[in-house]
Amino acid sequence: MIRIRALTRSFSIIKHEGSLIDFYLNSVPGPGLTPALAEYTELPSTGLFSGFYEAIRDFSIDSFMYINSMGYGIGFGIIALSVGFRLLYSPIILWAQVIALKTKMLAPEMSIYNRDTAALIKSGNTKQLQELKNDFLKLKRSYGIRNDVQFYSLTQAPFLFSFFFTLKNLTNSPENFPSLLSDGFLWFSNLAIPDPYYILPISISICNYLSIKNSTAIPGMYGPLAKNLKYFAFLGIPVSMTMPSAIVLNWFIMSFFQLIINSLVYTKTGRKIIRIPEVLPGSLQDKLSKKLAAQNLKTIDFSKKNN
């Protein structure tokens, strides 16, 4: 038998099939996590993702065992880690959403920029074209708009996929984690099987529906598709209703956090909380709204008094 050391755990390779290697994690068992050498999982045998996945998997299982040793079930551990990952990335996601909203507020400036850019490209005036690009970049930066923030939010993907595969492999071998069968909540006490009443899958779709409904229009999407996009959230119900409750519980927490973020950015109450103005100060929309307000003020006849 070949022995290898990967991060914090010792592994024994017991078989190889295709591109997957099956491992047993050698760790000290806690209540409900027996037998000691029977924590089963699968992972890709090569590549950078393999090492990252091992790290997230080891951290997740160690956390489950620690929480379990404190007298809490694995269901509580899933909630704790899901919320922890969301809290880690929520500020970045919120930042990216705010930038997306501010970008939409600069739509008139963007339209003028695109028009002038096309004209300068046609005329071949590269010097003025570069000056125009620099000026527009300075304008965006003055409002805190940065293009690289969207990339930062994408770095959560490896965490999400790694945690998903960890839960998937745990629920595929519930006999190695007996607590999965009883440490759920309310109507879904068995975390290794789908929600028997489909409440979690429906709740996920409702959260996604409200998130899309509250969100600003997606750039480049118009017509019936943009209008009915929010209803696409319910297309995921057939998939989530067949997944183990442990995985769907994690998905629900993700959807709920996204709903909170979208509500903060795209509702008037939320904007007041995080102090986002209705229009960007000094922008064309701001100047237009002030001009319209001044015109409306001129039409008011103050000589007439209410009787």
Image: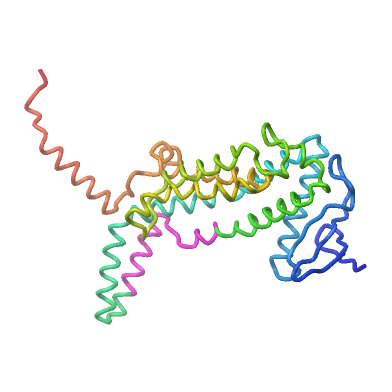
Q: Tell me: 294 left or right of 272.
A: left
Judge left or right: residue 108 versus residue 141.
Answer: left
Looking at this rendering, what residue extends furthest in the left direction? Answer: 303
The quadrant in which the N terminus is found is bottom right
287 drawn magenta: no
The correct choice, above or below, for 43 with respect to 271 in the image is below
Mark yes or no: residue 260 visible: no
Q: x, y (%) of residue 59?
A: 75, 52
**Image point 33% across, 49% down: which residue?**
280
Numbered disc total: 0
Which of 254 and 135 lies nearest the eye of the viewer?
254
Q: What's the coloring here?
A: rainbow
Relative height, residue 111 to residue 281 (above, below): below
Tell whether 206 sits left or right of 100. Answer: right
Q: What residue is rendered at 33% in x and 56% in y?
A: 222
| Residue 89 visible within the image | yes
- Please say whether residue 132 is one of the residues in the magenta stretch: yes
Highlighted range, magenta? 130-153
Quarter the C terminus occupies: top left
Q: Main secondary structure of the magenta part?
A: helix
Tell me where residue 219 sits by quadrant.
bottom left
Residue occupying image coordinates x 67% and y 53%? 164
**Percent x, y of residue 220:** 36, 60
Q: Residue at x 65, y 40 (%)?
A: 195
Residue sitting farthest toward the bottom: 124
Q: Does 154 sit left or right of 182 as displayed?
A: left
